[in-house]
Image (cartoon, rainbow, N blue to C red):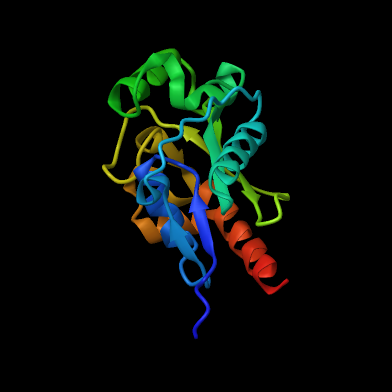
Amino acid sequence: MVNAMPKLLLSTNNRDKVREFRQILEGLPLEIVTPAELGLELEVAETGTTFAQNAALKARAFHKATGLMSLADDSGLEVDALGGEPGVSSARYGGLPNGEAKNRLLLQKMEGVPWEKRGCRYVCEIAIVDGRGRIHRCRGTLRGKVALEPSGSEGFGFDPIFRVPSRAKTVAEMGADEKNSSSHRGLAGRRAQALLDRLLQV
């Protein structure tokens, strides 16, 4: 009798994040599942004041609901000239949905800010709750600049206005492989992949 692969629950209802994590974690001896595939409807209030706290809240809630090893992330954009905005409020910034309206709001707030002061960073905090209920954490960041105007149609969120000077393009102008190799979520995801690999060998 062949033992079934252990399951890892991606604790998110965001299809874009699910797609990226499946790509990043490909190759692990895990069955990666989503709440939708389990018929689970669960919304977790993100009441933390840091990305790490919100990631942990989500991972613990989905683990408690299913008993499965659960991975959650909280990610966002921090803009130097705006004192770290939108930060943990990235997903709810201005009460707007991800996309053009939210990016337009941010660009309006950055009007008149010179290029040398448009520094920003993407942050991704991952929390993994293992089968014993223990929590593990991984972090990834990506430095860049707030672009003067949106460019590119790949990615999601603030990607069209997040320019990576070393690559002379926005994140939304990168293909999936290039993005995953350099992004905050890609870096945190590779660290999570290594962590999960160790957990599976215990």
Quarter holding residue 16: top left
Question: Can residue 95 be seen?
Answer: yes
Identity of the residue drawn at 70% across and 50% down:
133
User: Is 171 positioned to the left or the right of 117 in the image?
Assistant: left
Residue 138: % across, % down = 66, 50
The residue shown at (46%, 54%) is 21
Q: How many marks?
A: 0
* Position of residue 155 measured from the top left corner of the image (x, y, whole percent): 34, 44
Out of 190 and 111, give the one closest to the viewer.
Answer: 190
Query: Which residue corresponds to the image point at 56% horizontal and 26% vertical from the top-left?
Result: 46
Q: Determine if residue 124 is in view.
A: no
Q: Kindly give the residue lying farthest to the front in the view shown.
A: 1
| Residue extending furthest toward the left | 153
**Quarter of the rendering containing residue 42:** top left
- Which percent across, then down, holds residue 50? 65, 28
In the picture provided, is 96 more to the left or to the right than 191?
Answer: left
Q: Is residue 47 above or below residue 177?
A: above
Quadrant that contains the C terminus: bottom right
Name the residue at 36% across, 18% down. Answer: 96
Q: Quadrant of residue 57?
A: top right
Taking 113 as reference, is 165 above or below it? below
